Amino acid sequence: MARYTRQNFLAPVPQVRDFAELNAYLVTMCRDDLRRRVRGQTRIKEQLLGEEQVSFLGLPFTPFEACGIQPAHVNSELPARFDDNDYSVPMEYA
């Protein structure tokens, strides 16, 4: 769906003042897309998806942890190992 959305809603790049206007534009485009007739079908997209799948989902109740925090040991060669990968760290952590 990312490619479809980019090609149909964001090309050419919409001219908007801020994110609020962009979000309103995208909501309008998504709702218009639900009313289009799908090729090879006699019904519109909204009817094919069903009413329960058409509504926008709310945010989850618990926050999403976008990072993992884990203590790491740094040796004299300055790599820190995390998740089987070595990462360079500044000299003051050696």
Image: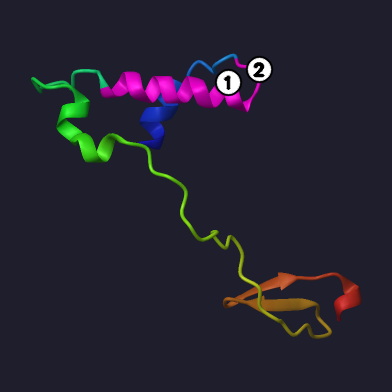
Q: Position of residue 20 (x, y in %)?
A: 59, 25
Q: Quadrant of the C terminus?
A: bottom right
Circle 2: element type: loop
Mark 1 closeness class: few <14, some 14–19, many ≥20 residues within 10 Å: few
Q: Is residue 40 magenta?
A: no
Residue occupying the point 57% across, 76% down = 83
Residue occupying the point 54% across, 16% down = 14
Quadrant assignment, res 15? top right
Q: Which residue is mark 1?
A: 21
Residue occupying the point 86% across, 77% down = 93
Which residue is situated farthest in the right direction here? 92
Q: Is residue 33 magenta?
A: yes
The three-letter amino acid code for the residue at tag 1 is: Glu
- Label 2–label 1 contact, CB within 8 A: yes
Give whichever of 8, 74 is nearer the camera. 8
Left or right of 41 on screen, residue 3: right
Q: Which mark is residue 66?
A: none
Q: Quadrant of the N terminus?
A: top left
Left or right of 40 on screen, residue 84: right
Q: Position of residue 35 (x, y in %)?
A: 25, 19
Mark 2 closeness class: few <14, some 14–19, many ≥20 residues within 10 Å: few
The three-letter amino acid code for the residue at tag 2 is: Arg
Circle 1: element type: helix
Task: Estimate the spatial distance between the alpha carbons at disc 2 and disc 1, rounded to whole Å.
Answer: 6 Å
Left or right of 45 on screen, residue 57: right
Query: Which region is colored magenta?
Result: 16-34
Residue occupying the point 58% across, 20% down = 21
Q: Main secondary structure of the magenta part?
A: helix
Q: Position of residue 7 (x, y in %)?
A: 41, 24
Q: Which residue is mark 2?
A: 17
